[in-house]
Amino acid sequence: MKIKKITYTILIGCFLLLNTGCEQWLEVLPENKVLRDEFWQSKQDVEGMLASAYDAFRATEEAIIVHGELRAGALTDGGAIKADAGRIDKFDILPTNSWSSWARYYKAIGYANIIYKMAPVAEKNDPIFYEPEMKSYQAEALFIRALCYFYLVRTWEEVPLITEPYETDKQEFSIAKSSADEVLDQIEADLKIAIGSAKLKFDKLSYTKGRATQWAAKSLLADVYLWRDKYDLAKQLCTDIIQNSGITLTPPEGWFSIYNPGNSVESIFEIQHTTYNKQEGPLYTLFKKDRIYGVSDEFDTYSWNVYNEVTDVRKYGAHYKTTLYKYWGARKMMELEVDPPERSGNARDVNFPIYRIADLYLILAEAQTELNDFEGAKSTLDELRTARGIENKVNVSSDRISLEDFILEERVREFVGEGKEWFDLLRIAKRNNFERKQKLINMALQAVTAKDLPIMRSRLQNPKSYYLPISIGELKNNRKLVQNPYYEDVTEI
């Protein structure tokens, strides 16, 4: 059995590499033999593979920050940024950049595909593994797959859509890209199935916040609907979650619990970390120990010198000067005293929030804005801002552009360092055939030096430059792939 399990793991690895070079490994398997009976004998086999899927998704944390935020303006070089991430930050992006690889996401997708297909086999073989629980595991796999594909489509736009596991050496390893709409259609379909089978909660808090529940699947689907301009559907889901989930915004005095210790009352889904079982996280190192990423001078100046809501807990709790504090386990209050104590130098247990109820308030406000319900959007924003200690009501013109801009500012105050701002800018910019492209350009150019400004402005005129190139390695290994249009002239194979 152990040898068979190892062989199956090698098979998984072959899929993850999307590399025809794996064929030499596949030759050791019996021709056309699917390893179901040998591996999928019990509920525990499914649970083990599901744990591997979550572990694979856990490894995407820094990629989410780099892909989802680094180009937007608020987050930048903290003083020790690595070369390839620095090039992403400056839009100096080539297919040879290590962050142009999508392997991290596809690794998690690979596990999810296997779980979804093989879990029914384990259910059939295990007399105490019942269908409702098996389907809940499938729902978790579909959530992981949908979430990874949502990151992929926002980062590369068009990507290979793979929904079946690789089981034999007869299957095709080279797969062409699917359109963004095809991928998004699959995401929606997966999430609708997941919502019908996922659990509402688990018996442990860390599972409820760290595994896919119905509320996590609904939150992701609401985000997808907003991305696709399906505002009525986004509004309906957000309203459902806010009114019926029992998940609430933290009061001002509890805001820091979102990050220390995490799994707060407003958490919906976050990547879990502990200081044991090899589940330590990178955020403490990225934002404190090595100072790889930090807050830009422009965002810091705006936050402290322009933004005048002095009672906003995020103003003093999230960052000071160019240092992001919320992942340290410390907060800088107005008097600049550290409270509570920061994490020790060897503590790596800070979780990474993916969705919390604040997301749903801001998705709802944006959907209401696009539906011309401007007063409704302001009311929704006021609810969130009250929970952040702000007494003043939203004071902005009742028109779409003004409220879009206000929501973008509110989102960066809420989510700085959580891998969202670039995706937020891109979502706003791409509407109505890139009607608001200039908004993205202006934000992206904030931290650009005067010397680089002309060439950067020229690059950003082409919306295809907002997506990353396919890595040179993927193009060599998969001859059905075609480089993303903006990068065709700089690709060498």
Image (cartoon, rainbow, N blue to C red):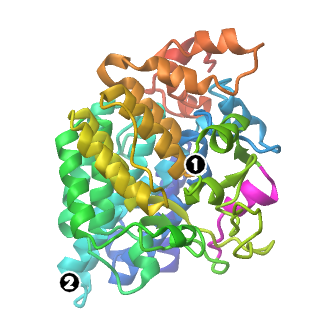
Q: Is residue 387 above or below residue 184?
A: below
**What crowding class fits label 2: few (fewer than 14 Cα within 10 Å), some (14-19), or many (20 or more)?**
some
Q: Residue furthest front?
A: 392
**What crowding class fits label 1: few (fewer than 14 Cα within 10 Å), some (14-19), or many (20 or more)?**
many
Q: Position of residue 289 (x, y in %)?
A: 81, 60
Residue type at numbered disc 1: Val
Q: Report the magenta residues as a range.
A: 278-291
Instruction: Tell me where residue 120 sits by quadrant.
Output: bottom left
Residue located at (42% from left, 59% from top): 386
Work out whether residue 353 or residue 301 is closer to the camera in this orientation and state it.
Answer: 301
Q: Is residue 223 visible?
A: no
Please give the residue where the numbered disc 2 appears in the rendered image.
130
Q: Position of residue 454 (x, y in %)?
A: 68, 9
Please give the residue where the numbered disc 1 appears in the rendered image.
416
Work out whether residue 457 or residue 332 is closer to the camera in this orientation and state it.
Answer: 332
Mark 1 secondary-structure assignment: loop
Q: In this view, does 114 lie above or below 423?
A: below
In the drawing, does residue 167 fall left or right of residue 368?
right
Work out whether residue 27 or residue 485 is closer to the camera in this orientation and state it.
Answer: 485
Q: Position of residue 27 (x, y in %)?
A: 49, 53
Taking the magenta stretch, the answer to whether it contains residue 254 is no
Mark 1 vs mark 2, CA separation in Å: 42 Å
